Image (cartoon, helix red, strand yellow):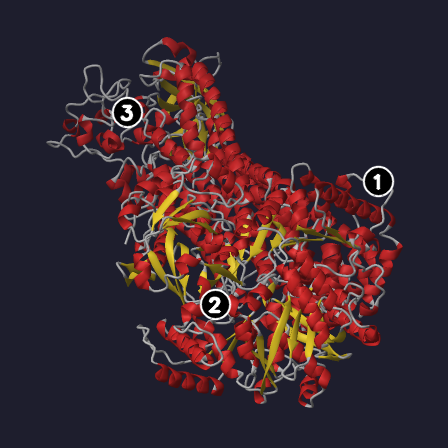
Amino acid sequence: MKKGGETLNRPDNTAFTQQRLPAWQPMLSAGIVIPGFVVIGLAFIGVGVALFVTSQNIQTLERDYTGVDQSSEHNCFQCLDVKNCICALNFTLSKQFEGPVFFYYGLSNFFQNHRKYGVSRDDHQLFGDTSYFTSPDDTCSPYKYDSRNKPIVPCGSVANSMFNDTFSLYQLVGGQKKQVPFDGKGIAWWTDYNLKYKNPSKVNGSLANAFIGTVQPLNWPRPVYELDTSDPSNNGFLNQDFLVWMRRAALPDFRKLYRRITEGDYADGLPSGNYSLEINYNYPVRDFGGRKKVFFSNVSWMGGKNQFLGIAYLVIGSLCIVMSLVMLIAYAKYRFDDEDS
Amino acid sequence: MACLQTKQLSHGTEWWNLSGVEMFRKRPPPEEERKVRANGREYNEKFQYASNCIVTSKYNVITFLPVNLFEQFQEVANTYFLFLLILQLIPQISSLSWFTTIVPLVLVLSITAVKDATDDYFRHKSDNQVNNRQSQVLISGSLQKEKWMNVRVGDIIKLENNQFVAADLLLLSSSEPHGLCYIETAELDGETNMKVRQSLSVTSELGDPHNLAQFDGEVVCEPPNNKLDRFCGTLYWKESKYPLSNQNMLLRGCVLRNTEYCYGLVIFAGPDTKLMQNSGRTKFKRTSIDRLMNTLVLWIFGFLVCMGVILAVGNAVWEREVGTLFQSFLPWDPPVNGFLLSAFLSFWSYVIILNTVVPISLYVSVEVIRLGHSYFINWDRRMFCSRSNTPAEARTTTLNEELGQVEYIFSDKTGTLTQNIMTFNKCSINGRAYGDVDPVGAQGKRPQPLDFSVWNPLADGGLCFYDASLLEAVKTGEPAAHEFLRLLSLCHTVMSEEKREGALVYKAQCVCVCVCVCVCVVCVCVFSLSLSVGALVYKAQSPDEGALVTAARNFGFVFRSRTPGTITVHEMGRPVTYTLLAILDFNNIRKRMSVIVRNPEGRIRLYCKGADTVLFERLHPCNHELMNITSDHLNEYASDGLRTLALAYRDLTEEEWEEWSERYRGAGKATDCREDRLAAVYEQIEQDMMLLGATAIEDKLQEGVPETIAILSLANIKIWVLTGDKQETAVNIGYSCKMLTDNMTEIFIINGHTVQSVREELRRARERMVAHSREGGKGDEAAGWAQACSLGNGVRGGDQAGWPLPQEKEKQESGGRVPSLLESISGEFALVISGHSLAHALEGDMEYEFVETACACRAVICCRVTPLQKALVVELIKRHKKAVTLAIGDGANDVSMIKTAHIGVGISGQEGIQAVLASDYSFSQFRFLQRLLLVHGRWSYLRMCRFLCYFFYKNFAFTMVHFWFGFFCGFSAQTVYDQYFITLYNIVYTSLPVLAMGIFDQDVPEQRSLEYPKLYEPGQLNLLFNKREFFICIAQGIYTSVVLFFVPYGTLAHATQSTGEPLADYQTFAVTTATALVIVVSVQIALDTGYWTAINHFFVWGSLGSYFTILFIMHSSFLFSIFPKQFHFLGSAQNTLEQPVVWLTIALATVICIAPVLTFRFLKLDLKPQLSDTVRYTQLVHQKKRKPGISGGMGISGVGLGAGALGRLGRSASRRSGYAFAHQEGFGELITSGKNMRLSSLALATFASRHSSSWIDTLRKKKHANSANASINSANASVNSANASVNSANASVNSVSAIANGQPQTPPAPALSNSSSLSGSQDTPPEEVGLSHAQQAVAQQAVARDGVHSGTASHSNGCTLVTRPEAETGGCSLGAVQEALFGWRGVGARVSGASSPGPPPILEESSPTE
């Protein structure tokens, strides 16, 4: 047999072809698993305790103002069938509400996460692409054209259903209503405000001109360029409330940031006392059995109040310890059994 | 070169024998009969017969795309995804973008298409190669070179020696007298011995091309069919009819041998040839995992529909209760006017979303993994045979994991277990044994084989004989030895052929005989021949005979040539010519053959060789003592698995001879009962013979066969040998490869010729088994174990080991056996069944009995089976046992079984590639089978199972999240994740780690799988992936999905960022869930991966890295600014992943998902360890202890034990006489009739034996038989003593011209010398040595344990090996098998306990270096 011919067909002698690649072969040995569980358990308990304590320290205040059921705190049940109704919600803080305080509105049983709802928007429009103003995306249907066949901008269900209750908070100091200043800046995601949403470039120095030929969403009282009458720069698609609304919630029970309380006397929080929240009650939720709520909350390093996470960490951490004990017992038992034999 | 696809191919014949015949009948053949006119192309074209072009490829450049796509969409999965794609184009229900389906689908389709295209390319190549072979066609009177594919039906083509037959030919004439020609049909039926074909005498006279060109006979014959052994037709020529039979046919695939040239008329061409009709389209084989997978996929479809229905109902309810009211904010689409329609649409939407439970990449991933495994098989150097320079080849890439599940192996014998090489190994001459040298040698040094060429120029050189004493005896002229060898050189039917390399090659085409020139040439010829006779080649009917004659040749008794009446032998360099008076031919009943010769001195002697049992009865009484000694020797040989023959002679007086020859002639002339009469006459003369001795021939097993069989049977694989050989041969091989041992409780031989007798025999076998296991398993088995232990039990009494003949079996009165009991039978039984019994056993109601009986036996040997029966047996087991079968063979006769079995393995041996072509795997040595199964198969199975488990798991974990989300999003088919994540999850984020695991994972190293064959069992029992495992995976997946949805739900629902912005927006939720999912499944694959190569690391970390990279890219403002609608997740990644809460959520979800799995696995490992875990554990502990001497110690101790235990497990009373097993009757007659003799060889022989004067007489005597011969070949037909010399000169001239006429003859590579030279170089490749040591150890242990097995009750004494501490640490392979039985509990504890006293230290000890 010739050497050359022999080597011709002989497979290569490499670690790869011969399946001899150097390899780490871990094994679930007791020496790894049981201490591993103990370590994880302890770590989880530690984190859990931290989370729990932090979460406990966060103050929240939650009120339902739907008005479906009678309440002594508010009179919003009056507004159920009335247009442009204003109702007030009174509450008392027994102790200082540490600042900065965040004020949220919440909706429940509202399906922003419905597929049809979610797609019913036109990102091109919202990106300021005026070519989509005249012919909005089909997904916006049926909020694409109004009855006179004029294109709706911003089109779609999401924009159309924008939450339009407005709030103003007053501290009742000696019978006087002292307004608590709300800060509505930067309540939307930075990326949304700066990258994702863009107003169309102004025509003749006016934003309104850019929207000529379009109509506002059917439910809206004012066009998009007049959303905030107080602050001209907070209009169009870059209106903070609009941005907040357009970021769909993942679950039918959600809250959205309305304002921050960071200014003036209230920069350190809401002092104890009586407060009155004036609500411009516009948004209908009774049809579909929804609820409207308001929340006050402050935050920690880990955000708002989150009992679940702390408790879950504690439970899982303890379970890990229990499991490690079970495994240790099983391991020891088998070992003793073996010694007996 | 493309030739048109022919109609025959298109009605695809998916036959092989099994149903081929029936199918053929059912479907009316396209032609009723075939009419072919020689040299009549115009006439034949009328019928549009297929041309000789074969097409096995499926596509060409143009048809590839449509045909391939069509084929691919016949796959249910692909069609399903196409359907989904169409669904997604409907806007009302499209819950996902179209690209989420089309990207994977296109990927899958293109990968498959590339693979198909490559396959077809190679088919094109091989087609081209075959179609472009050259052949010589007689066109308008002259020979022209034509490609094979241009040969037409009706053409006359010329074939030369050693050429493949191009088409099915009617033999017209040949270079040999009487139109004889020899063919080898190895490609067709696997038989390696030559067959004779003869042309009709009318056509054989045609002779030269000129005459043949005028030949215009018309053949009318049967239409094309696949029956290899039948042909029926008629030749019409010159107003006469001549019947044609298979005897006149040369079939495509045969090789012309020993014939210079021949002419044939093409009858069937290309696809019509019997070879092609027999090959047919390969049946597509599926593995059991495949089938299971298909079932599971169907179930998943069902599951999917259920989910869809549940969610649709949910949607209906929601739309009715909530949706209608919510319309002020989300009005229904115009077409939707009610909740029912909405529910209906939502059903389809959910079908689209949830389709990922049936992962599109599943099939393609499986294919990729299998392909990888196939490459590993192709690349395996330990399955590379350096001798034949062939690597193993996985010809099918779809069956790998089934290799890990094989339960039954059906093996061919010749060429598979054996090398089909017979070597003269030992002999006993006049009571003295020769050749009994331990081949391993006392000092471990291999003794040098004798070099015969030093003193004997005619020596063959291929013989390996180690005992110099025989040579001494021959040299000193010991008469018995001489007579012994003389017998060997005379008493046979071997033909010789002398070829001189570079012989005079004169292309003398015109036959112009000039006497004086010719005489000169002849003189030169003879002169040169007598000088150099190097290439003396024997053409033996059976390899046994060849071996014997070759042995005699090497010892100085060189058989040179024969004529019908003489045999010329060079005895010690001196030519002696014996007059051959009679050949008393061999047949099965006689089991012996004799020749009667007259030596030059005029003494008449009968030489006889035959089976000892037959021969000893016919010896002269005075041989009694010698007979006893020889008998002892024979026993010894037989116990070594050698095939024995006894030799004897008898001196005859002239009177005796005259008297007997008279009767002989009388019997020969008899017309009725000629056979019987002849046999009776033979019987008369073969009496009172003098014993000369005995020979022992080794039917050389392939290397490592016994070890392989031992290991495989330890792996609980049952091996059946199905052979066309005779019972004796088969049993013989059974013993020599240790399938049968004398330790076996009983061997049943089923040999009945009627249904009743077979049934009776099977019944009795079962009775015996049941009876035995009832009484047995106690005392005698323990004794058996003890005996087996005490080694060297060759001397043991043969009571138990006896070979009970059927009639010896006593009837057992204890009936009442239940067939199902047979499974629990103790003791080892073997079954030997012959072909004719098998035919009955395979009949309808007998099947079950046969299967039950056979499966209770440890070894089953079926002998004398036809290819069809081989397939039927395989089919039977497939059907009844539901077990995975593997068939291994090398010849075309194994093709049917190779194709029938789940896995077909072809031995790419010396001759014939039919088996390899039909096979799924091929390699060149039987012993590679253990590696293929125990290493590659096992791994493949393991990897595939782990892969599938994980794959289903990850897809359920991924998809079911949508289901839970459905309850919170109004069942609106809102996806949880970004659509790009859905698109890429299966093809990018999670595909590669699991692929790497599926390709590279190893639980235990390869050596361990060979050391612990029990590791193979999980595959056979289908433990690693079955419906239960599937449900566990699914459950785990669903659990994970629950965790993945509800943990983020719980944490994020009311969580806010530290900036006060809520976290519960959809995009944050999507990113959190997706990230948690990717991390969880990555951790899971990390847990599942047992063998972390660099590639695994790269893929796992790379996948995670790619996930985050792609996530950030997809959520970047750059992409959004181009496609705002598609990439509206802008900023989510950044916003989400910077939140600590999100990471805490992910960590929580991961731990909740993984911790239970980890606990479960640990406890399982701890409380119920699998053997593989144990092995892996011990392995790791060994590694950790880093004892360098381990492996060495293992090997040495293993071998030490093995060498002892193996010993010589002799069989005492069972002697297996092996006379000329592959022998065919009738060659004696052919020789004495002189039909097969070329005049040339006659003449040469006469020249060579000039001194003998009897040749003229011989010629005269044979004149009547030869007259035709003479009249053709010599101009001078008159035969008288005066011009006899001229005559002979003439004849020899003829012969010379005959030689010169043809092409320069390549000396036919004689199988014998070729193969013996192969066996001469027995160098094991270096890297195999270590392994083979280990294997030997196991094998030998296995052999030692054979005894134990029979007494399972007394098994516990195996511990002696284990309880020794050094046996655990050092002698891994020693205690291997025993340890395997004890499981990890024992080993682990012992190992850890040995070095550490209490639990805490153990923890430290077994934890990795930290």
The residue labelled by disc 1 is: B815
Q: Closer to the camera: disc 2 or disc 3?
A: 2
Give the chain of mark 1. B
- Give the CA separation, mark 2 to mark 3: 106 Å
Work out how far the residue at label 2 is from the one at label 1, CA to CA, in angstroms. 68 Å
The reply to the same-chain question for discs 2 and 3 is no
Crowd around label 1: few <14 · some 14–19 · many ≥20 (10 Å): some
Q: Is residue B602 left or right of residue B1313?
A: right
Measured as percent of width and height from the top left, residue B675 is found at: 65, 57
Q: Residues within 10 Å of mark 2 (few under 14, many from 20)?
A: some
| Residue at x 58%, y 76% (from the top left corner) | B566
Where's residue A126, x and y in %? 25, 32
Task: Please tell me whether residue A158 is drawn above or below residue A321 in the rendered image.
Answer: above
Q: Give the class, few, some or many, for how many residues have Cα within 10 Å of label 3's Cα (few <14, many ≥20).
A: many
Local secondary structure at mark 3: helix
Using the rendered view, name the quadrant where residue B8 is placed: top left
Amino acid of disc 2? Ser
Q: Nearer the viewer, residue A86 or B418?
A: B418
Inspect the image, locate mark 1, and give the three-letter code of the amino acid beneath it. Answer: Gly
Residue B1267's disc number? 2
Is residue B1029 left or right of B920 when viewed as pictured?
A: right
Q: SS for tag 2?
A: helix
> Dividing the picture into quarters, in which one does residue A47 lie?
top right
Task: State the residue at coordinates (35%, 42%).
Answer: B7
Badge 2: chain ID = B
Q: Nearer the viewer, mark 2 or mark 1?
A: 2
Name the residue that disc number 3 marks: A140
Which comes before the other along the chain, label 2 or label 1? 1
